[in-house]
Image: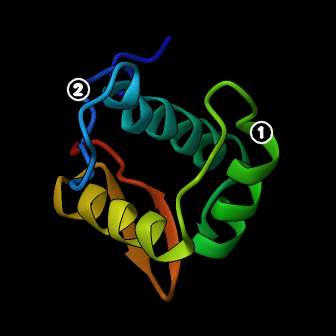
Amino acid sequence: MDTEASASSTNVGGGSGGAGEDDTPELYWLLVYNMLTNLGSMPSDRIHSMLNMFVQTPNSYEWSPQQLEAYLNRLVRDDKLVSSGGQYSIRKPAA
């Protein structure tokens, strides 16, 4: 597994802190990282659709498109993703 993908997640605020909830952003980060690595850059609505398809019970995907966009923008601020023209992609390591 890529060490960059297994790095600490970026949490989304507003959770109740219940059991397993803290793992949700980490799971989403790993899925988004793998999606963007394998499929290339994509807009948040496509990422949202794919998460809806792939995240099933017991950890079903329940974020709104706005929550996902806020999370993706936080990953951009944390230098994990790049956003350009409405497309998100993995930030390339500095050479």
Residue at position x 27%, y 46% in the image? 15
Measuring from the top left, give residue 85's x and y in whole percent. 49, 88
Left or right: 93 in relation to 84: left
Q: Amino acid under label 2? A: Ser
Give the camera-side residue of 23 and 9.
Answer: 23
Q: Amino acid under label 1? A: Phe
On screen, 5 above or below 2? below
On screen, 77 above or below 57? below
Most distant residue in the bottom direction:
85
Cα distance, mark 2 to mark 1? Answer: 22 Å
Measuring from the top left, give residue 8's x and y in whole percent. 23, 26
Measuring from the top left, give residue 81's x and y in whole percent. 36, 56
What kind of colouring is applied to the model shown?
rainbow
Residue at position x 21%, y 54% in the image? 13
Check disc 1 and report its element: helix, strand or loop.
Answer: helix
Left or right: 82 in relation to 68: left
Most distant residue in the right direction:
53
What label does residue 74 carry, if any?
none
Residue at position x 35%, y 16% in the image? 3
Measuring from the top left, give residue 59's x and y in whole percent. 61, 30
Check disc 2 and report its element: helix, strand or loop.
Answer: loop
Q: Which residue is mark 2?
A: 8
Residue at position x 27%, y 52% in the image? 12
Left or right: 4 in relation to 62: left
What label does residue 54 carry, if any?
1
Give the camera-side residue of 58 and 65.
Answer: 58
